[in-house]
Image (tube, rainbow, N blue to C red):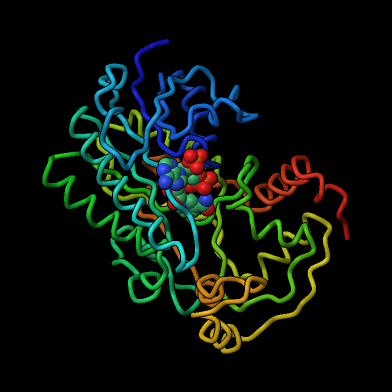
């Protein structure tokens, strides 16, 4: 196996899986940093990843992977690993998102590598009203998204990593995608909204927005950053923005599942979120999810299309292929039809 030129963290995740496919197709010698090599080897899609070098360790902890002789030739680090949870109960896990990113800046310094950090559109593109958008120059949306631990951790990770990278002279590229959909979400995290429709589990529709893109188009854009000579500091990867009602109806249409028009007003969702903030009963959505479902997500880009060749496919195609994959891989959803 050739000496790795690229290191991927979060390789066992939804985006990691697709990025490994892109790197394999481009014949880029690749290493993955995983916390459990046995779990890595057990994944039913591991053959798709091709011949990658596997290193054991946590991106949050400096040794011993940092000194592994096989990693000295790494020139691009893709830091995708993140604790993704929309709850205030998850605050300690969110520290991982900051600490691991700072550790990756130090690794990039050690190897003279470029660091590509996967952040989120929510750090800047979260609004109280529809039709507003954030581009790469927009400020952090701290007053809204900063109330939620996951987005707060991504804002903190971006800010602290930028400060450290500037101090150490490390090239840091930050990417901000919205919700990613598409085939291959083996953890069933990103595609939860689609699963709700397929499982006939959508009691009411909140008033907020949805913004989604295709995971395969994000992975392809990431792949360009292995060779792009002078990347920008930040790239947005916008997709389709719509209301939650429009989104659920689109999923209903492509899947043949009926979506009942039971909208609930914003004041009611916010009221329930406030009441359950301290003690949310297990059967209710987390108050963070309720709060998020009253907000709108708007994103645009000044340069990702030209520089990363990022042109997301038609949203309908993404939804059709997401639904087909979920039905094929989750028998409980297979036969549910309207
Ligand atoms: N999915 C989306 O819609 C979306 C949208 C915007 C931004 N993003 C960002 O894109 C990146 C990839 O997302 P994804 O959807 O591919 O995530 P995912 O499927 O949930 O995978 C998360 C990855 O992070 C690793 N990880 C989590 N906690 C860890 C810890 N404490 N120590 C070591 N590894 C840990 C997991 O490894 P294990 O297998 O060991 O658990 C897994 O490889 C993340 O940074 C996420 O914040 C995602």
Q: Give percent across and percent down for residue 197.
A: 74, 61
Closer to the camera in the image, 103 or 294: 103
Q: Is residue 281 above or below residue 178?
A: below
Which quadrant of the structure image shows residue 41?
top right
Q: Give percent across and percent down for residue 210.
A: 57, 65
Left or right placement of residue 112 versus residue 4 in this view: left
Could you tell me if residue 5 is visible in this image?
yes
Q: Is residue 251 above or below residue 306?
A: below
Which quadrant of the structure image shows residue 93?
bottom left
Q: Give percent across and percent down for residue 51.
A: 50, 17
Residue plotted at (88% across, 50% down): 335
Residue plotted at (29% across, 54% down): 157
Q: Give percent across and percent down for residue 237.
A: 44, 51
Left or right placement of residue 117 versus residue 296 in this view: left
Could you tell me if residue 80 is visible in this image?
no
Question: In the picture, which quadrant includes the N terminus?
Answer: top left
Question: In the picture, which quadrant includes the C terminus?
Answer: bottom right
Closer to the camera in the image, 289 or 248: 289
Residue furthest to the top in view is 1
Left or right placement of residue 209 versus residue 54 in this view: right
């Amino acid at each position: 196996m050739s000496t790795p030129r690229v290191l991927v963290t979060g390789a066992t995740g939804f985006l990691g899986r697709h990025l490994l496919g892109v790197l394999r197709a481009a014949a880029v010698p690749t290493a993955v940093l995983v916390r459990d090599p046995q779990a890595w080897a057990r994944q039913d899609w591991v053959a798709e990843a091709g011949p990658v070098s596997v290193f054991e360790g946590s991106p949050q902890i400096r040794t011993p992977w940092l000194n592994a002789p096989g990693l000295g030739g790494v020139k691009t680090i893709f830091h995708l690993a993140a604790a993704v949870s929309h709850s205030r109960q998850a605050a300690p896990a969110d520290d991982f998102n900051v600490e691991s990113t700072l550790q990756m800046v130090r690794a990039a310094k050690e190897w003279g590598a470029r660091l590509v950090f996967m952040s989120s559109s929510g750090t800047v593109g979260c609004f109280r009203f529809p039709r507003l958008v954030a581009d790469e120059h927009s400020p952090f949306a701290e007053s809204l998204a900063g109330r939620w631990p996951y987005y707060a951790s991504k804002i903190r990770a971006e800010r602290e990593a930028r400060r450290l990278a500037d101090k150490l002279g490390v090239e840091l590229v930050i990417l901000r995608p919205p919700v990613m959909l598409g085939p291959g979400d083996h953890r069933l995290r990103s595609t939860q909204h689609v699963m709700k429709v397929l499982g006939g589990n959508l009691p009411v529709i909140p008033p907020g927005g949805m913004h989604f893109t295709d995971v395969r188009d994000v992975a392809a854009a990431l792949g360009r950053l292995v060779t792009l000579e002078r990347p920008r500091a930040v790239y947005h990867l916008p997709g389709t923005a719509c209301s939650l009602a429009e989104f659920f109806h689109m999923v209903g249409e492509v899947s043949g599942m009926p979506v009942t028009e039971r909208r609930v007003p914003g004041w009611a969702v916010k009221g329930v979120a406030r009441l359950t903030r301290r003690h949310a009963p297990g059967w209710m959505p987390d108050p963070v999810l309720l709060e998020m479902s009253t907000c709108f997500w708007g994103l645009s880009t000044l340069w990702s299309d030209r520089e990363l060749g990022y042109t997301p496919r038609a949203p309908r195609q993404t939804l059709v292929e997401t639904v087909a994959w979920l039905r094929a891989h989750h028998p409980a959803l297979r036969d549910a039809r309207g």
